[in-house]
Each structure stands twice: as C-alpha cells, then as structure tokens.
Image (cartoon, rainbow, N blue to C red):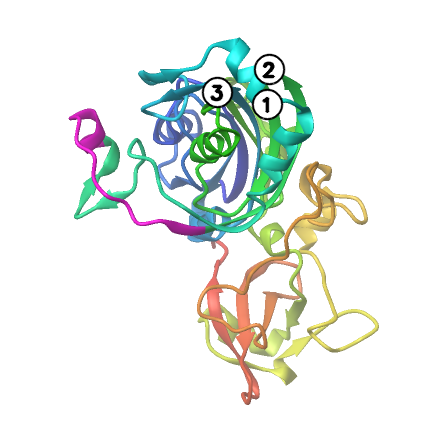
Amino acid sequence: MHHGMLTIYKEAGYTSSDAVARLRGILRMRKIGHTGTLDPDAQGVLPMCLGNATRICELIADREKEYVAVMRLGIKTDTQDMSGNVLFRMEDDEMLSRLSTEERIRSAAASFVGEIDQVPPMYSAVKINGKRLYDMARKGITVERKPRRITIYSIRVEKIEPPLVTMRICCSKGTYIRTLCEDIGEALGTGAAMQSLLRTRVGQFFLGEARTLDEVERIAKTSPEELPLLIRPVDSFFEDLPAGICAADALRLLKNGNPLTTEDLSFPGPSSDPLVQTGASRESQDRTGAGQTENGFSTAERSASGEIPPRAPLPGLNPADKVIRVYDDRGVFYGLYVKKQRQNRFTAYKMFLPEG
C-alpha cells in the first residue's frame, strides 16, 4: 500500500469523487481521499491522500487555493458559469460603454481583496437542513443562504479582451470563484459569469507537479517502480514544523503514542530549541536536494499571485503551542507531538505509525 500525497491534475468531465474512484482502480487500493471538490467543468490541482495520509485530508483542504479564472462580462446565468441557463445578456456596445477603461475592471476586482462575506450559490454542495443546494436548484427551488466569511488574498487581472477577463486569484477555503465573478460583474454594472476555471495550487501542491489520471495509469502499468517518485511522504506536508528525534530507549513510548519528555527527544542542528529547528525525514532527504521538497517545490516558493499565506494553527491548538514532527533514529516519521503552555512534556497530536 502507498502512503503519502499524490497531486492529480483533474480534467474536465470528472467530479472529484470520480477521480478518487478511478485512482482506487489504478492503484488497487481503497484508502484514498481527495482534499476538496472541484466542479466537474473545472480543471487543475487535486491533491489525493493515500494510505495513512488520509488523516490529513481536511488539513490540506483547509489550505489556501490559487486559481486562474476566465470571466465573461455582459451575461448572467443561473449557475454563475457558462453551463447554466442565461438569465441576462448585454449587447457588446452597451457593455463596452459601461466599462470605459481597463482600470475600472482592475479596480472592481481589487475591491474584493480582503475578508468578505460571500453567499454560496444555489448550484453548490452546501447543505441546508440536510439537503444539498444543487438538488433543490435542479427542482427550481431557491432558498435563502447565509453569507460566509472568506478571504481573498489577492486578485491579479492578467488579461483583458472584452468580453473576457482573465484573473489569477489566491483565496481561502470555501471561496466560490463563480460567485466572485458574478459579484465583480455586478460591481461593474455589466453582469458576469465564469467561463473557465483552472486551479493552479492548493497550499504547497503546485500545478507543475500534477499528473493526469491517464499518466498515473500509464506509469502504474509500464513503470510501477516510478510510482513512489510521484508520491510525497506524509511528513513533507509539515516541513515547516521543527523535527525531533526520539531516543532509542523511548521508542516504545513513541510507538504507543505515549507522552515524551524533552529528555526523550533531541533536536539536530545548532540550537536545541524545537521552535528554531526544522528538518526532514531521511526518506525526504534521500529523494530531494538541499532546500527542496518532493518534486522540486518548497513552501518557501512564491505563488504566481504573491506570497503564500502562513499556515494557520493546527485544529485545536493555539499559536503558543509548540508542535514538532517526531522521528526515530533511522529517520522514520511517526507523527506530530505538541507541548502546550505550562506543560513539561510533549503529547501525541496526530500519529502516522509506519507499517511493520
């Protein structure tokens, strides 16, 4: 069984669940989960968690996303993209007269940067009273939806060729780019719908490393020994956290997920402070060069739209809590441990016990 994260390029025509089902068949394993849905017509980065990495599906889904969206001005549909029924269409001459300058488009887009409230679309997987909104929408039912607080970290308008506008957007979990396009269209007074969507990044998972399901299937059939090269080790997701090495005489405690004292751990490097030290598993070091993570990407790398937002505290923890990755003396990753304020020991936070 494989353990780790595989960055899939989801092609149009697949749901995220379809992609999981097909990957299960390709890899011949059941324990696979995806890290957040992409609309069937959308394409791009869809990280998959394999084996014990399924324990971090939600953590990956919580990371910021980056998209390249093409917005069509002068139109409004019931789905907020071009797959729906047209509710309104503006003549090109009238639309161009309302836009006046490219700067007006850029200013309208920029006005949505920051924390904003966004109403989820009717054609979405959001549940109200146990029912999916898209199921109600298909029956012609519209219900009131409460706005949700999201964050747009950046919007960069890359191309303006009316009626089409191409934007690169970095945003928080839960953002509907279709809705953002429609809202920008409303701000411009022209209406708008999303024409296409490409997800280029989820956290530290980038488009450049993504593989289509056809590619993965070909490798699995013709060169199965190359499959592990596509899979990131679980600990690479936590590469920004300091690393501790468990002493041999405390390994029994580690294997059982028992608390560890500072005497049970060592922190390699010039400082013994676990807040200062970082490290990588021996597996990660063997597969990458200095300063790189798997596939040549690093969380220090900038996204195309700006700096990657810092990781939020892990669920249930405070910023003051010290979280470390714990390995045995052979470099095998066991899990995350946390030392809370006013405690003198580390307790297990999330374990990824190796097989065998």
Specify whether residue 32 is in view: yes
Magenta-colored segment: predominant secondary structure? loop
Q: Give the number of the mark in front: 1 or 2.
A: 1
Of residues 107 and 3, the one drawn nearer to the viewer in this rendering: 107
Q: Mark 3 points at which residue?
A: 11
**Residue 46 part of the magenta segment:** no
Q: Give the number of the mark in front: 2 or 3.
A: 2
- As drawn, the residue found furthest toward the right would be 270
Write down the quadrant of residue 210 in the picture.
Answer: top right
Disc 1 is placed on an element classified as helix
Q: Give the range drawn in magenta.
A: 135-149
Asked if residue 285 is positioned above or below residue 303 in the image, the reply reads below
Of residues 12 and 248, the one drawn nearer to the viewer in this rendering: 12
- Which of the marked residues, 3 or 1, is nearer the chain's N terminus? 3
Disc 3 is placed on an element classified as loop
Location of residue 246 in the rendering, given as x and y in whole percent from the top left corner: 62, 72
Location of residue 125 in the rendering, given as x and y in whole percent from the top left corner: 30, 37
Could you tell me which quadrant the N terminus lies in? Answer: top left
Say whether marks 1 and 2 touch (CB < 8 Å).
Answer: yes
Q: Mark 1 points at which residue?
A: 99
Q: Name the residue under label 2.
A: 162
Write down the quadrant of residue 171 in the picture.
Answer: top right
Specify whether residue 163 is in view: no
